[in-house]
Image (cartoon, rainbow, N blue to C red):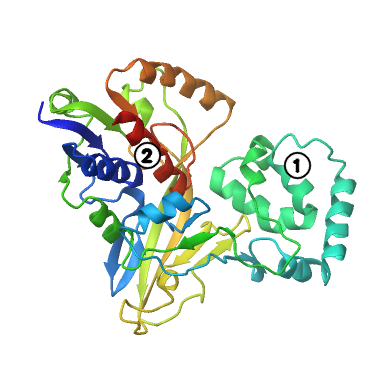
Amino acid sequence: MKYNYLVVGSGLYGATFAQRAHAAGKSVLVIDKRPHIAGNVYTERVEGINVHKYGAHIFHTNNKTVWNYLNQFAEFNRFTNSPVANYKGELYSLPFNMYTFNKMWGVTTPEEAAAKIEEQRKASGITNPRNLEEQAISLVGTDIYQKLIKGYTEKQWGRDCKDLPSFIIKRLPVRLTFDNNYFNALYQGIPVGGYTKMVENMLDGVEVRLGVDYLEYKAELDKLAETVVYTGPIDAYFGYKLGYLEYRSVRFETELFDKPNFQGNAAVNYTDRETPWTRIIEHKWFEFGKDEQGNDLPKTVISREYSSEWKPGDEPYYPVNDEKNSALYAEYKKLADAEKNVVFGGRLAEYKYYDMDQIVAEALKKCLVAN
């Protein structure tokens, strides 16, 4: 065996594991079936703009260990996520805060806003929220749910809000302040020069082979290493023999415009049901519309995002963690636990929604255990 570790996938989990193992003196081979490194955080340069090819990725964390770790490989700018909600031409602040409540109801004090939410919650008769719709109404009232949550969420998940679990919306920020900082994390920003550059730095000195489909050449690739670190879909690893896990996928339509400004913000969510896309990302605003030398960029690139039901061959994005899929994953997890010398890690291998900082933290932990 030539390597201590074969890492399947060069996204954040794979890159973190590979970097730590390499730094510990282990021999590592990273493979990826895509023609590029960095997985879904991959950014490509278009007219000097770092375009987030697989959707917007805004790094945010309260974990100082993770923040310090990644700052070895990139300098982060001070980007703060402050999305805008567009409901049929009406613009609202996200996260839901006093600007939102003032625009929706004309209230000007936190007391008035809280009273309005409570009034609508009581009128709905919800005491113990059983689904996403009831949870959302109990958090922000009926008006905001109808205009700013219902349409967007149903487009995103392809299901009625009454059929979605309440936990999906529990992390929604609701503030009785004028704070527009969506994540409100201690540390946040975008790597200067893009995520691809950061992952390149992480994989410095590590052997990487691109365009290699692990599952197609599994038998021969497994012989190369003592341990496999697998970050792909867990059901694909086992040939879908227990059935397919469900995901939501996302399709992007990206356009270059010969003008400096399309929408004036990095992210605008379209919350009505009729608009087919969920949001438009204008990539240059992740870096304040300037290149690395601080010059204004004369063009702009946008991506419209369309949510869709996943089917084999599509890119899986969001696990559908409902009762049926959770039960199926539990069966695949038993098979995974029985696999010798294989580490299953990351969003697809663990069928779990992770923020980027959580992915890095898990990989650091697993690598420590593995070594």
Q: Residue 8, can we see it? A: yes
**Can you tell which quarter of the image residue 218 is in?**
top left
Q: Give the amino acid type for the residue marked by disc 1 in the picture.
A: Glu
Taking the spot 63% from the left edge, 67% from the top edge, the residue there is 180
Left or right of residue 215, residue 113 in this image: right
Mark 1 element type = helix
Q: Nearer the viewer, residue 302 or 311?
A: 302
Q: Is residue 146 above or below residue 310?
A: below
Graded by Cα atoms within 10 Å as few (under 14), some (14 to 19) or many (20 or more), the crowding at tag 2 reads: many
In the image, what residue occupies the spot 71% across and 64% down? 97
Mark 2 — residue? 363
- Residue 371 placed where, x, y %? 28, 31
Question: What residue is at 59 percent from the left and 61 percent from the top?
Answer: 182
Task: Return the residue at label 1.
Answer: 134
Query: Of 97 and 228, which appears nearest the observer?
Result: 228
Taking the image as shown, residue 2 lies to the left or right of residue 366, namely left
Residue at x 59%, y 26% (from the top left corner)? 323
The local crowd at label 1, few if under 14, some if 14 to 19, many if 20 or more residues have their Cα within 10 Å, is many
Say if residue 54 shows up in the picture: no
- Kind of residue at disc 2: Ala
Q: Secondary structure at mark 2?
A: helix
Of the 4 image quadrants, the one containing the N terminus is: top left
- Considering only vertical position in the picture, is 204 above or below 4? below
Residue 294 in picture, x, y percent from top left:
35, 82
